[in-house]
Image (cartoon, grey):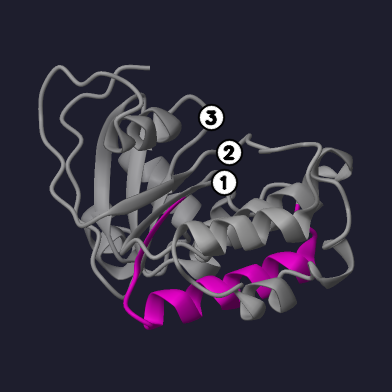
Amino acid sequence: MLLEGVSFTARSGEILGVIGPNGAGKTTLFEAIAGFVPKTGGSVECDALFYLPEAIRPWPDRRVGWCLDFFARLFRRQRDREAIEMLQLDQLLEARIGTLSKGEARRFVLALALGTPQAVLLLDEPFDGLDFRQTRSAMSLLRARAAAGRALILSIHQLADAARVCDRFLLLDHGRAIGEGDLRELQTRARKEDATLDEVFLALE
């Protein structure tokens, strides 16, 4: 997927949702920002960032608790007990990472990302594999971390989840940015007052 003219701003203290269907360019955008794929133009201006890809499961033979402690020592921090509790990892600390289910693994790596000190977090599909209650807890945790001053940029393909957790949105379609702003601003641009996020997206694509 090639990106064309995509420009946006992520602000400290907010959650920005990068929204679009599969193949819209969300992951490509994150990888370009993180320096994983070459850029032919443009620039990225931001404080230090941490990127959590969608499908990653480090050190499959190690235990969850070991990995959380390793990351904490790596960044000279304490184990993130709030994240462990809210992401329901207490009972998984002795489990080997390779044995975790999809949802368990996603909650585990999300805790790793939230335990880092970088001011900007890129989280690709953070709720993938989580059930309704787990998603609610994860959203509460993300909102708390944004309120504490971090800038969170989430790639989300489920528009209902995006509408519940994000402050503003970047709408992507076929590698192009078709809108940026909060829901009210996007409704105004689409000339659809009181429209849902998916209705706005369809009007702007």
Give me the residue at 20% from left, 57% from top: 47
Q: Which of marks 3 and 1 is in front?
A: 1
Whether pointer 3 and pointer 2 mark residues with C-beta atoms closer than 8 Å, the reply is no
Label 2 neighbour load within 10 Å: few <14, some 14-19, many 20+? some
Main secondary structure found in the magenta portion: helix
Give me the residue at 31% from left, 76% from top: 13
Instruction: Provide the secondary structure element on which disc 2 rests.
Output: loop
User: Where does label 1 land, which residue?
Assistant: 125
Instruction: Report how far apart the C-alphas of labels 3 and 2 lie in the structure.
Output: 13 Å
Quarter holding the C terminus is top left
Q: Nearer the viewer, mark 3 or mark 2?
A: 2
| Horizontal relation, residue 47 to residue 187: left or right | left
Figure label count: 3
Whether pointer 2 and pointer 1 mark residues with C-beta atoms closer than 8 Å, the reply is yes
Up the image or down, 109 lies above or below 181; here it is above
Of 205 and 82, nearer the camera is 82
Label 3 neighbour load within 10 Å: few <14, some 14-19, many 20+? few
Instruction: Report how far apart the C-alphas of labels 3 and 1 lie in the structure.
Output: 11 Å
Label 1 neighbour load within 10 Å: few <14, some 14-19, many 20+? many
Amino acid type, label 3: Asn
Indicate whether residue 8 is drawn in magenta: no
- Mark 3 vs 2, N-terminal side: 3
Q: Which of marks 2 and 1 is in front?
A: 2
User: Where does label 2 land, which residue?
Assistant: 54
Of 79 and 176, nearer the camera is 79
| Horizontal relation, residue 144 to residue 204: left or right | right
| Horizontal relation, residue 185 to residue 59: left or right | left
- The image's mark for residue 22 is 3
Q: What stretch is highlighted in magenta?
A: 130-154
